[in-house]
Each structure stands twice: as structure tokens, then as C-alpha cells.
Amino acid sequence: MTETVDTGRRHFLTVATIATGAVGAAFVAVPFLASWKPSARAKAMGAPVEIDIAKLEPGAIVKVEWRGKAIYVLHRTPEMLKQVNAAVDQLRDPQSAQSEQPDFAKNDARALKPEYLVLVGVCTHLGCAPLDKLTPGDATVSADWAGGFFCPCHGSKFDISGRVFKDVPAPTNLPVPPYRFLSDTRILIGAEAEKA
């Protein structure tokens, strides 16, 4: 007695086994691949931050957080804008050639709109938080101080545009983050400015 092989049944079992294996692999692969996506918290940490500056008075500063860093938004007064180049001969990088900022900030004001300065509030020396010492002649900095930012950790000084002075530990100007104006009263930190 010879046994005959049922090729139809063998083909059916082969196809069923392959299909079951493929479905099983998909059930394993989907959660595995989903684990590669950044979490909602991670996305939020890098997401742009919107700031309402409608109530920011001239001469006042607001501090927010973006990507775990302090961001300073200073509404400069006309008097502050007159001081932008008061100490240009004492600055290490007055043209911001070696500093981190978008192309639109490579000017004396280091800003899209001169009256609004947006900076990363982290000293470029060792990462301390510079204090806003905006009052000219502030004796805690120096008698000839024109106003700006002072790092209390190691004495680095930055002018009213966040440009670093010579002979201080900080090597570069305070960074300017990417940002754009959504309206006259709203700034979006973390988004590139539209090209003019």
C-alpha cells in the first residue's frame, strides 16, 4: 500500500503557517517600532513656545523656558537702544561673527525688531544664569556700566544686546534662539523667522 501525498493540503498548511507567522511578526513589530517614537513629553520639550508680550512694559524682561533653557525677552526702551553701541570697542565679538544666532540677528540689536531682544539666558562660559543688570551705572557690576547682563558665577559681562565683553571668561555672545513674530504682541520661540 502506497501512501499518496495530498499536495493541496500541504500547500494550504504552508500558506497558513506563513500567514500566521507574518501576523505574529506584525504584532511584535508594531509596539517595537512605536517605542522608537519620542514621547509626548520629549516632543513638548523641543516644541516651540509662544509668548504674549502685549503687557511687557518698556524696560521690563520676561523669562520663559524652551528646551530646558531659560529664554529672556527684553522690551528695550529708546534709551537702551541708544546704549547698544556704547561700549562696542570693549566687546569681544561686536559683529556676532563667532556667536550662535540666526542670520537675522547678525546686527547691532541682534533682533528681528530692535526693541525686543530675545536671548538664551545661559552664560557661554559654564552655563550659569546671567542676571539682568539693565540699569546704567549699576555699582554691583562697575561704575561705568551701560546696562546689560552679568554672570555672578565668574564675572562675565554682556551688553544690552547680549554681546560679551573682552577679558571675561565667557568666550562668545549669549545665543539668540530661532524665533519669529506671530503678531505685534506674540512671539514664537523655536521657529525660524519667515524670509523677507
Image (tube, helix red, strand yellow):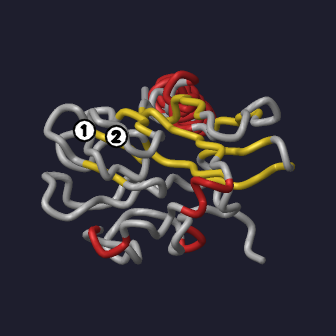
28 w.r.t. 189: above or below: above
Return the x and y of residue 132 as percentages of the image width and height.
43, 36
Amino acid at circle 2: Val
Quadrant location, the C terminus: bottom right
Return the x and y of residue 176 as percentages of the image width and height.
48, 55
Classify mark 2: residues with Cα within 10 Å, few (<14), some (14-19) or many (20+).
Answer: some
- Mark 1 and mark 2 lie on one chain; the one further toward the N terminus is 2
Classify mark 1: residues with Cα within 10 Å, few (<14), some (14-19) or many (20+).
Answer: few
Residue 127 image label: 1
Between the residue at mark 1 and the residue at mark 2, the CA separation in whole angstroms equals 5 Å
Q: Nearer the viewer, residue 48 or 179?
A: 179
Quadrant in which residue 3 is drawn: top left
For the point 73% across and 34% down, the residue is 57
Amino acid at circle 1: Gly
Q: Is residue 8 left or right of residue 133?
A: right
Task: Classify mark 2: helix, strand or loop.
Answer: loop
183 w.r.t. 132: above or below: below
- Which residue is identified by label 2? 122
For the point 59% across and 47% down, the residue is 190
Q: Residue furthest right?
A: 183
